[in-house]
Image (cartoon, rainbow, N blue to C red):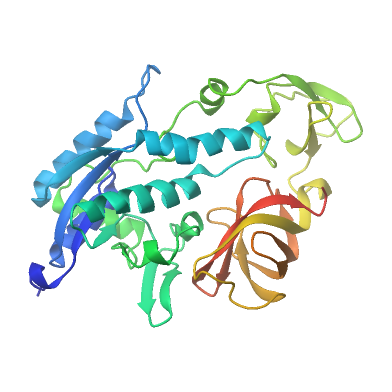
């Protein structure tokens, strides 16, 4: 039996138009929370042909809110998104790094701008459709992995702090994605079969190279092997990432075997893209990294260095055993038990102990730099 609404906190749920946030809202209503929904618009539409995702998402969010009998507000955080997320995103690409905008978007928009807005409405909590779990105890708020290990999104949430987590509800913590879709179908929600978004946070699924080129100057240059053999021409170093295979435009090379080519490095002095053959070429492997912008969810590191923990270098990567060899306020050095492939500056290294996300850092470089 649901508890009376008056005994539970008032919750603002971010309703994106997707199935995850829709089911999250439904579960909150069923549990007896006083629920209000908010649709966040964080990118001003442009004239790109065939792209109108925000309008379609808003229509889906409105239909879900009507069906659940909850109010829906719309709020525009486009300025905040540009200033706090997108400018950093562009700066990282200018520096020839590969940023992860979803991580910063979560901290600055979904769990800061949205949280601040919800508090002005009188809400005590916010909720989202993220696949994660939060546990509150005498030591504070802890970010834990969810039941669906394939969908777990703690990697993207490692920059959250105690003030944000203490006011957050993750209704999908105990559900698999399959069960979420089943619930949506049982309810007859209009977005039950809607495809998951895989594009840039709030910007969506676009032709990425074309989109990025609108904001950054690009200078073509040579594609070379480590030995200096010229293989072709790249479109601009910022458009490529370490470990990338697709989109290199390298055809058959008379003196090379037929294994696929991968991006191994960016030679900024010569504006050259360095590529190698083979998924596990030695130049793609490293046992250590240097991290910067170090953040601990608890507000402090879990132990004096060196300490052992687990680490994830990309979403869905199996957790890797590592040692945080040293750290200070902002920097750290991490050594892995096994070689890691395609460790990419600008991406995040996220630390875990068992199923708890401890925090993480932005990858600055590797032992090959």
Please identify the quadrant where the N terminus is shown: bottom left
Figure check: 92 above or below 127: above
Residue at image point 25% right, 42% down: 39
Residue at image point 37% right, 20% down: 46
Image coordinates for residue 87, horizontal then vertical, percent: 52, 34
Image coordinates for residue 7, horizontal then vertical, percent: 12, 73
Residue 2 in view of the camera: no
Residue 4 in view of the camera: yes
In the rendered view, does 207 fall on the left or right side of 132? right
Residue at image point 36% right, 76% down: 136
Figure check: 255 above or below 303: above
Nearest the eye: 18 or 289: 289
Please identify the quarter of the rendering in which residue 27 is found: bottom left
Residue at image point 48% right, 40% down: 85
Q: From this viewpoint, which residue is outermost toward the right?
A: 227
Figure check: 307 above or below 297: below
Nearest the eye: 132 or 96: 96
Image coordinates for residue 356, horizontal then vertical, percent: 49, 72
Please identify the quarter of the rendering in which residue 47 is found: top left
Figure check: 283 above or below 122: above
């Amino acid at each position: 039996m649901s508890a009376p609404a008056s005994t539970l906190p008032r919750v603002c749920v971010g309703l994106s138009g997707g199935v995850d946030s829709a089911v999250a809202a439904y579960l909150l209503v069923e549990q007896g929370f006083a629920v209000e929904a908010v649709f966040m618009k964080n990118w001003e539409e442009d004239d790109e042909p065939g792209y109108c995702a925000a309008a379609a998402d808003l229509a889906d969010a409105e239909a879900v809110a009507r069906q659940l009998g909850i109010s829906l507000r719309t709020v525009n955080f486009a300025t905040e998104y540009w200033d706090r997320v997108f400018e950093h995103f562009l700066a990282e690409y200018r520096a020839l790094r590969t940023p992860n905008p979803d991580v910063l978007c979560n901290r600055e928009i979904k769990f800061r701008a949205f949280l601040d807005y919800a508090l002005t409405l009188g809400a005590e909590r916010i909720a989202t459709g993220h696949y994660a779990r939060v546990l509150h105890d005498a030591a504070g708020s802890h970010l834990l992995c969810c039941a669906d290990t394939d969908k777990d999104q703690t990697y993207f949430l490692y920059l959250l702090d105690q003030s944000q987590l203490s006011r957050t509800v993750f209704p999908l913590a105990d559900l698999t994605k399959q069960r979420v879709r089943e619930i949506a179908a049982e309810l007859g929600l209009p977005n039950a079969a809607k495809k998951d978004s895989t594009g840039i946070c709030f910007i969506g699924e676009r032709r990425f190279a074309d989109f990025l080129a609108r904001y950054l100057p690009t200078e073509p240059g040579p594609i070379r092997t480590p030995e200096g053999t010229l293989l072709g021409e790249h479109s601009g170093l910022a458009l490529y990432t370490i470990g990338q295979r697709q989109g290199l435009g390298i055809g058959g090379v008379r003196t090379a075997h037929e294994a696929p080519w991968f991006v191994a490095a960016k030679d900024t002095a010569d504006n050259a893209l360095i590529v190698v053959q083979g998924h596990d070429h030695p130049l793609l492997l490293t046992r250590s990294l240097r991290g910067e912008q170090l953040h601990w969810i608890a507000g402090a590191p879990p132990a004096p260095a060196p300490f052992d923990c687990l680490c994830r270098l990309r979403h869905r990567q199996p957790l890797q055993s590592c040692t945080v060899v040293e750290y200070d306020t902002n920097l750290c050095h991490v050594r892995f038990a096994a070689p890691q492939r395609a460790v990419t500056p600008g991406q995040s290294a996220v630390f875990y102990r068992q199923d708890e996300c401890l925090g993480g850092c932005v990858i600055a470089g590797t032992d090959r730099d």
